Image: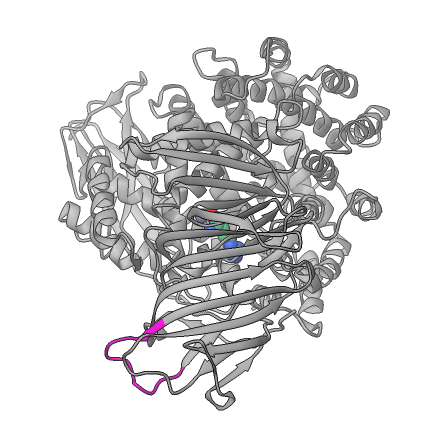
Amino acid sequence: MRTDTGQVINLADYRPTDFVLERVDLTFDLDPTETKVEARLIFHRREGADPKAPLVLDGDELSLSGLLFDQMEMPAEQYTATADSLAVYNLPAADPFELTISTIINPQANTQLMGLYRTSGIYCTQCEAEGFRRITYFPDRPDVLAPYTVNIIADKAANPLLLSNGNFLGGAGYGEGKHFAAWFDPHPKPSYLFALVAGDLGVIEDTFTTMSGREVALKIYVEHGKEPRAAYAMDALKRSMKWDEEAFGREYDLDIFMIVAVSDFNMGAMENKGLNIFNDKYVLADPETATDADYANIEAIIAHEYFHNWTGNRITCRDWFQLCLKEGLTVYRDHEFSSDQRSRPVKRIAEVRHLKSEQFPEDAGPLAHPVRPTKYREINNFYTTTVYEKGSEVTRMIATLLGNVTFKKGMDIYFDRHDGQAVTIEDFVKCFEDASGRDLAQFSLWYHQAGTPLVTASGSYDATAKTFSLSLEQMVPATPGQTDKKPMHIPLSLALFGENGGKIEPASVEGAEYTGEVLHLIGRTQTAVFHGIGSRPVVSINRSFSAPINLHLDQSPADLALLARHETDHFARWQALTDLALPNLLKAARDAREGKAIACEQTSIDALLHAAADESLEPAFRAQALALPSESDISRELGSNNDPDAIHAGRQAVMKQIADRGIAIFTGLFEKMTTPGDFSPDAKSAGRRALRNAALTYLSYVENGPARAKAAFDAANNMTERLHALTVLAHRFPESDEAITALSTFRDHFAENALVIDKWFSVQATIPGASALNRVRKLMESPLFKRTNPNRVRALVGTFAFTNPTGFGRADGEGYRFLAREILDIDQRNPQLAARILTSMRSWRSLEPVRAGLARAALTEIERAPALSTDVRDIVERTLK
Ligand code: ARG
Ligand code: ZN
């Protein structure tokens, strides 16, 4: 492991390289423990660069085994090589020259899963962000682009498959049971998009004909025997390719597109040019083993990685500070894709739920950073929900501000102007300024100011003047390193509704730009006056979640109930239902803490039940309406001095009251929302299952809980219902015979399927209450637990820390201490994984004082440990600061 050097990288220090890389020619002689890598690199000195400057290449745990200059051995005094850099001196002032660099690496010993490593006998790579420098010395930064030729030599029997980026050039035998293959990628790319795969895998194949009539071969490689489980991924890939042509005019640009699924992978997937590598969790699915959420994730991630071909690969980032240039934009594109393939409002609800539960806490805690940061110590720690999800929201706001037509025009300018380049956020924003003629300087603060803006709104109606005045005030909270914030340009989608539920169109609006139902909030305070309003309106603000903000607006339960029934934007209906439920949950948490009886306000329960029973609404929406804000949503709203046990107890009591009142509705839904016939993962069927599952959850609070859930578990013919029934059993009745039997049946039935066993671990990791920790500890001793498999570690340790507030946050602090020890252990093998799981501590300051003290002690224990990785040191120090 490379331990921390404490070095901070600053955006302000960016400068182009002194040398231009013209071509890359790589040869790999693969061996599990001694892979020989030869890199032939052709450079020339950049015009205007210092004629004496040495060429300094990046390395990471490398050792140099040979260095040639124009095919001749390089004299020792002309270079210095260390494990993390190679500097070469006295290079030509203008002429191109060739360096041939030899290194020997050990893929088998690479437990960090960065660079070239082995998983289940397969060689594979992960180079983003800085993994390529673990393969060879290289200018390993995204603004160095070149065409690559890759030659792979390997034992033929063990590695019938030899893959790399681009198009296949040819292959042949290579003596001694070896063979080789050559690939050429004509599209200049940065090293982080390099990929190599070798091994023995099964494949499913298809073709796609592009809009200009070119046929592209599509291949998805999976472990032998798992081929049928890749069918849905292939379908999603073809739909993605078609959608990108239709929605953005983007055509694929190689003869072949390949996806390889591997079981040990640090993240979701990686967009390497022409050769995406995926965590197999986001490729493999069948009705027996995958939930509807799994299918939706596969569709979204296949699309995401494919869309990177244009937003990321053809146009890449100048430096890693610009990460949101490709990630925020590509998440926006995959969200749009899924919205078009499924139900737009339901998709939007899911996006906002995710944003609020993951990104809002990040933005409100010690790890807050701007969408476009200005400094980092470890770039791997910036693959965050802020860069991805908030980055997507910022892109979405550009579309909202400009309207879709102008937004698309800006995207066309972007693709035209910057194809083949490595660019910045400023370059991106300029395209939209040029397309619209609008000045986006104030808007750009969304990239630069961290923290979730708080907008406080209050309305008043003047019946004689027939005006409705809306006063708005914005405040961007202080975040680490940023205390004084400027007011932002906030697009608020807004509409007014009359007492009968019909929309009221104002005759004119004064005090704020209001176009296309979007109000532009630009001042710190601003009052918009709507004229020609004949009766008191009910205002709906931030419809479709047009801006990622917190909104404070006092609305009566009756007004919210009206919006919940009549808003034409179904996202806003869901928001109204949530706004109705939330005060009850907050009050319940406070009452539970003081040992008081918990009583819910009826309007909110009735509105919820009304939506649940409303057959004019799609089932998926009704399921979202029934899914109350989570315990972490509640603690975020409470803000400080949080007691997870009280929040849990309060929420449970509210659930019980809703269940008691809605028993007939829930019984009816549970019986009716079946999906007979052959399983189909389509959104409509998934919606029915979601609603049926929601009903089962509430029914567990009334009568026959364990028996009913067990019957549902036994009768389930798909994973969505089976897993949900299992979750209800385990979470609600963990000690019951039904739960114990179901858990062991499930384990025995699916013991061979790693992805299902991950679910089995996760269900148990999230059982509420203090006893969860002992269960987690026992599970870690299980022969099914594999410390070296990131999915398994995330499923058990990660899920416990991130999503079990009462178990992980138990009052005696044992959960925090447990995590500290696990982090130190994981860090030895896989720093990225350790650092990621450690971010589960990011909200520790909002806990009540006793827990906060215990959490701080655990963090301090990590901080004081010797030999931390840069990844973990960076997170722990920022978290404690
Ligand atoms: N670019 C990949 C994606 O599509 C993720 C890479 C994550 N890399 C990392 N070092 N964490 O989102
Ligand atoms: Zn991405």
Would you place residue 372 above or below residue 602 in this image? below
User: In the drawing, does residue 727 fall left or right of residue 775?
Assistant: left
Q: Is residue 385 visible?
A: no
* Residue lying at 84% horizontally and 31% vertically, measured from the top left: 735
The image shows residue 830 at horizontal and vertical percentages of 65, 59
Observer-nearest of 651 and 813? 813
Q: Is residue 749 visible?
A: yes
The image shows residue 1 at horizontal and vertical percentages of 66, 69
In the rendered image, residue 172 lying in the magenta stretch gets the answer no
On the rendered image, what quadrant is the C terminus found in? bottom right
The image shows residue 627 at horizontal and vertical percentages of 56, 28
Magenta part of the protein: which range?
A: 43-54
Observer-nearest of 429 and 790? 790
Name the outermost residue toward the bottom: 77
* Residue lying at 77% horizontally and 19% vertically, measured from the top left: 710
Residue 541, quarter of picture: top left
In the rendered image, residue 45 lying in the magenta stretch gets the answer yes
* Residue lying at 40% horizontally and 19% vertically, measured from the top left: 565
Name the outermost residue toward the right: 737
Would you place residue 417 above or below residue 34 in this image? above
User: In the drawing, does residue 319 fall left or right of residue 267?
Assistant: left
Observer-nearest of 405 and 567? 405
